Image: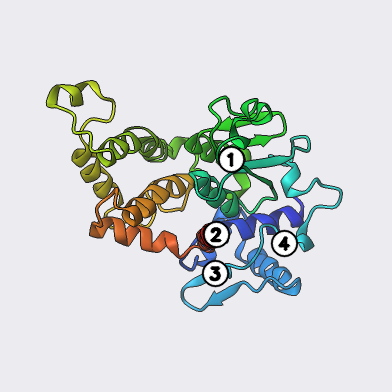
Amino acid sequence: MSRSIRLQQLIRQLRHRQEPVPGPELAEALGISLRTLYQEVAVLRAVGIEVVNTPGEGYVLPPEVTLPPPALAEPGAPGKAERGSAETAPAELVFYTNPLSRGGIVHWMLEELGVYYRTVTLEYGAAMKSPEYLAINPLGKVPAIRHGDTVVTEAAAICAYLADAFPEAGLAPPLAARGDYYRWLFFAAGPLESAIALNDLGVQPTAEQKMRLGCGDYWTLVEALAGAVAGRSCIAGDAFSAADVYVGSHIGWGMQFGTLPRRPEFEAYWAGLAERPAQQRCAAFIEQARVTG
């Protein structure tokens, strides 16, 4: 493994950790010795990446550091926007969205990845129903992405795809540890969103209808979700993942617009996610769209 790749992996190990990472733990995760870790941190500092080392606690990466910094690019390697991994052919990543839509979920995910992408903003109405866009999504809705020849629609599917397409960002757990990751990602995409929509429309299914609906009872789902995030900063293990992007978006928006109750469990979980630099950039983008729109 080249030093450039190893340094990029070091940055990625730190980028999604909010608490300091002890040196021995970080070295083990990278498969290197402590001595080598010290050398790599020194190299990062030499190229302007100021990794902070708090004695007795560990290493922290400032949130403004890009992934990876241009100074560490592999000579002759395709750019971040042009690849799904080091082994794949160059592929353009195009993001179709409207700032005031569920596209905000995918926008956050893309910012967490730190990859280059091209944004195509579509207005509601004719633009989303044009033949060109209907070839991307026959439903005429956003968000959608095109990554090379691969087209993915539906926000949860896009988040899951991007986490796998760019594994170096560390936004999906190892395959053997994905039980909670898949469970809560698609819990939010399926029964939770359906129940929220019905409740928001004032539709109160009968007991028999609840048995026939895939979402079941709204308040049962709220309790299940509250239990999943209670006392946790991440919903699927100890590390931030695409599941937090998707579930967190529903909780943040739900409390903002009143479609979910402001329970202490939701507020505590969302407070941690709202502080992430990638999420704050997306929030600022949405706010600007509201002001200018």
Q: Which mark is residue 162?
A: 1
| Of callouts 3 and 2, the N-terminal one | 3
Pointer 2 residue: 278
| Of callouts 4 and 2, the N-terminal one | 4
Compared to 195, does 98 lie above or below? below
Q: Position of residue 268 (x, y in %)?
A: 31, 61
Q: Is residue 166 visible?
A: no
User: Is 291 placed left or right of 117 in the picture?
Assistant: left
Compared to 47, does 267 lie above or below? above
Provide the secondary structure element on which disc 4 rests. loop
| Of callouts 4 and 3, the N-terminal one | 3
Amino acid type of the residue that numbered disc 3 sits on in the rendered structure: Val
Q: Residue furthest bottom?
A: 55
Q: Residue furthest right?
A: 76
Compared to 251, does 174 lie above or below? above
Provide the secondary structure element on which disc 3 rests. strand
Label 1 to label 2: alpha-carbon separation:
15 Å
Amino acid type of the residue that numbered disc 1 sits on in the rendered structure: Leu
Amino acid type of the residue that numbered disc 2 sits on in the rendered structure: Ala
User: Is 24 placed left or right of 77 in the picture?
Assistant: left
Which dot, 4 or 1, sits closer to the camera?
A: 1
| Of callouts 1 and 2, the N-terminal one | 1
Which dot, 3 or 2, sits closer to the camera?
A: 2
User: Is 222 placed left or right of 31 in the picture?
Assistant: left
Provide the secondary structure element on which disc 2 rests. helix
Q: Position of residue 257 (x, y in %)?
A: 34, 53
